[in-house]
Amino acid sequence: MVCNCSHSAKQDESGAAKLPESESDSLILSDDPNHPANLICELCKNFYVNGWVTGTGGGVSIRDGDKVFIAPSGVQKERMLPENIFVMSLNSKKYLREPISLKPSSCTPLFLASYDLRGSGGCIHTHSQNAVMCTLLFDDVFEISHVEQIKAIPRITEAGYLNYNDKLVIPIIENTNFEQDLEDPLKEIIKKYPGTTAVLVRRHGIYVWGETVWKAKIYNEAIDYLLELAVKMKLHGIPTVK
Amino acid sequence: MVCNCSHSAKQDESGAAKLPESESDSLILSDDPNHPANLICELCKNFYVNGWVTGTGGGVSIRDGDKVFIAPSGVQKERMLPENIFVMSLNSKKYLREPISLKPSSCTPLFLASYDLRGSGGCIHTHSQNAVMCTLLFDDVFEISHVEQIKAIPRITEAGYLNYNDKLVIPIIENTNFEQDLEDPLKEIIKKYPGTTAVLVRRHGIYVWGETVWKAKIYNEAIDYLLELAVKMKLHGIPTVK
Amino acid sequence: MVCNCSHSAKQDESGAAKLPESESDSLILSDDPNHPANLICELCKNFYVNGWVTGTGGGVSIRDGDKVFIAPSGVQKERMLPENIFVMSLNSKKYLREPISLKPSSCTPLFLASYDLRGSGGCIHTHSQNAVMCTLLFDDVFEISHVEQIKAIPRITEAGYLNYNDKLVIPIIENTNFEQDLEDPLKEIIKKYPGTTAVLVRRHGIYVWGETVWKAKIYNEAIDYLLELAVKMKLHGIPTVK
Amino acid sequence: MVCNCSHSAKQDESGAAKLPESESDSLILSDDPNHPANLICELCKNFYVNGWVTGTGGGVSIRDGDKVFIAPSGVQKERMLPENIFVMSLNSKKYLREPISLKPSSCTPLFLASYDLRGSGGCIHTHSQNAVMCTLLFDDVFEISHVEQIKAIPRITEAGYLNYNDKLVIPIIENTNFEQDLEDPLKEIIKKYPGTTAVLVRRHGIYVWGETVWKAKIYNEAIDYLLELAVKMKLHGIPTVK
């Protein structure tokens, strides 16, 4: 999963043209704050302040048409720069841009799963402690009902959003030693729960995606709110489902 | 409750003149940081940092004479701009300004209730977890006494503020599936508790209003402080009323 | 305690000259970020972010020679401006500067107690929830020992600071309905505990002072850290004194 | 441990040339935000916001070749300036730069231990409450396993990082009345645990180091995340090791 290929502008084995880093800068440099490379940096700072991606944990990816923008691995999220961002073609799964001496997020195959299986426009992965705690307090699925914030979560399999008194169900998959080994279980659970916009990973964190990266961000905030509330409810002995 | 009407400058059915968005900009564009449209944006950012309006939850409204300024629905609170703000005439209940492709906050009828029934100058709605937790830990009303911060809460039915040893009582109404269905219960409870400046909504959040938006903000901060303290007291087995 | 006197530049009853607000601006306007009027505003913002002075609770005062600078009452701490600051002569207890339409902090007599009885250079009052919780979890005094942070607290009655294994003791006085009624109990307890640099007020908050406002700030941070830790220790069933 | 020597540019007893403060400014003044003196200030602000170094607690040091940069003692971390930074020669243990009227961090011998025994490039000391709580909830060592964030912690005795299902073990040493008395126990425990990149000090805090200061920062964030999670797991009755 780690990219160690050279960065010269040669045809790679598959024949795809890869630009040298300097030429590929046009893919990630823009004055528009809403350009995906800028947005990823803004979101990473926001998530750092929320404690969701400390210690270089977690990651963010945005899809713009065929182009997938991916935060690098191992870079401090609050110090990330547009020039650190990887760009991949979703169709060919080839990198269009690879920053020298960086590796793409090890979550890349998992981000791609949300694009390939759901056509999403953005995917967020955090190590939120609320998420980890809920995977310790719940078994196969996280469940909560009768909380207003549930209305921010989409139905997916049909138009619109959940009702206040609907039960939000988020599946929990088991963690693996290597992040790439999560790819198959994640794909399976996405297919098994066609109505979910998120998957919890036991003792690890959460993946949340949406039609756009903004939707993904809003869903992630709303879900984290519900996970946090659930931990408090458990501490006070209040059941999360009425 | 959602506004889908067209945005041309025609006379509407009631005869009120509605400006096209470009002309109505004068209602919301100002260099004065204390202009309601600027204040709403500032307050939404403040509330976002406090975790009260994450995931597009909650809302803020300010009344300036007959003009009611209302934050839109579904916009991320920390990224809100003055041009996103709706303006309504309190008297006619007609929109004077409707940003294209946005919907007014679904809390609008509830904000209006505080203007119509109490003549307030600002109304705040949050999804504060302290508020939600207290609606799970208390029955019909939230009650706390003998805490200094209580002195920040107004008496309403007479001049002045509560004493330290007074009991603050905030009524709790049941949540409904649709926000507009909260309008009647909210109006009823406001009439039933003439001395309250806030209403809790079970498993949902809180509405707080005041003579001005600044008063509403201060009351909201003081009440949230007391709700947070009450949750901690319950966890440590300390009664909230002496 | 509330100042409602007129703001004209007349001789007042005691014969002290009082400047009109415009002339007295020289007392509070300065480009030096370390000028007391600027520092009070900076500290109030810092305390607001820490949740110690939300809802206009709490206050700060700085003494510079005979001049005592006092934050006003009822102003939102994160929006305070130098022109909102009161200035009093410690010796005559007369105001040298009174902003029109504001009232000095109701804590003023309590700030003065730390200047008169201890010769301190700054005094901080917060409604910290850690302070309030500790007054609910402890009886006459708050006590903690064997925590490194205790070494930040001065001995007062002799040179130097507490040792790691010393017991920090902070007296708790009962709250009163009116802040001015706290003056006598506070003075008594300051005399009874000559080694304390802080006094807790039951169900209210804490007063902390120091040789300079910076010392007061550091002591306040260190004490609040210890109060927060003590609440957690109690929750986990760990005694705060070995 | 406290430096009270004079600041004139004389040969000191050991013959090392010491520059007067003005000339030694070249050691700490730089436009490069990544210069160690600038980084220490940036990190101290970051740690202050995280609540790890309030009340002047904690400290940071960076090594650049033979030069060791050390934050001063007693300065508020969020207000630290490059001119407050001490510089020492690691080889000679002589100060190359000593700011007038400041004392070097009392943690200096402990920072040096990580440089001398491990060749680290940066060392962080915090009074994190999560660290202190874990020293109260664990005996000789802090232990946690099966959490994804563990993968951010290096193996040290061999290349690479811990696996998700490895057990992270951080030794705990007893606190002493004087910080310099921690030097010998710290050196002993570093030798006894050749695979650790951190040492907890009972009722005090934590020391974390790394190949570079950025590695140290990342390790510190990841470890603090795990300490925080462990406290929550204990509160909910969940064992930290499977």
Image: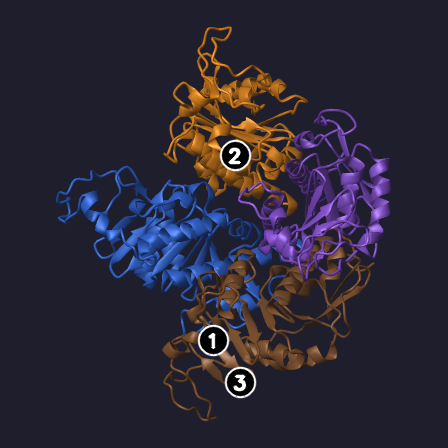
Chain colours: A blue, B brown, C purple, D orange
What element does badge 3 sit on?
loop
Residue that numbered label 1 is attached to: B86
Do tag 2 and tag 1 residues touch (Cβ < 8 Å)? no
Residue that numbered label 2 is attached to: D80
The image shows residue D96 at horizontal and vertical percentages of: 46, 17
Considering the image in quadrants, where does the N terminus of chain A appear? top left
- Note whether B86 is above or below D198 in the view shown: below
What element does badge 2 sit on?
loop
What element does badge 1 sit on?
strand
User: What residue type is disc 3 on?
Assistant: Lys
Q: Chain of mark 3?
A: B
Whether residue B36 sits left or right of residue A10 in the image: it is right
Q: CA distance from mark 1 to mark 3?
A: 12 Å
Q: Nearer the viewer, residue A109 or D9?
A: D9
Q: Chain of mark 2?
A: D
Question: Is residue A192 something one can see in this rendering?
Answer: no
**Label tally:** 3
Residue that numbered label 3 is attached to: B93
Q: Are marks 2 and 1 in one subunit?
A: no
Whether residue B112 sits left or right of residue A152 in the image: it is right
Question: Is residue B193 something one can see in this rendering?
Answer: yes
User: What residue type is disc 1 on?
Assistant: Phe
Q: Chain of mark 1?
A: B
Q: Nearer the viewer, mark 2 or mark 1?
A: 2
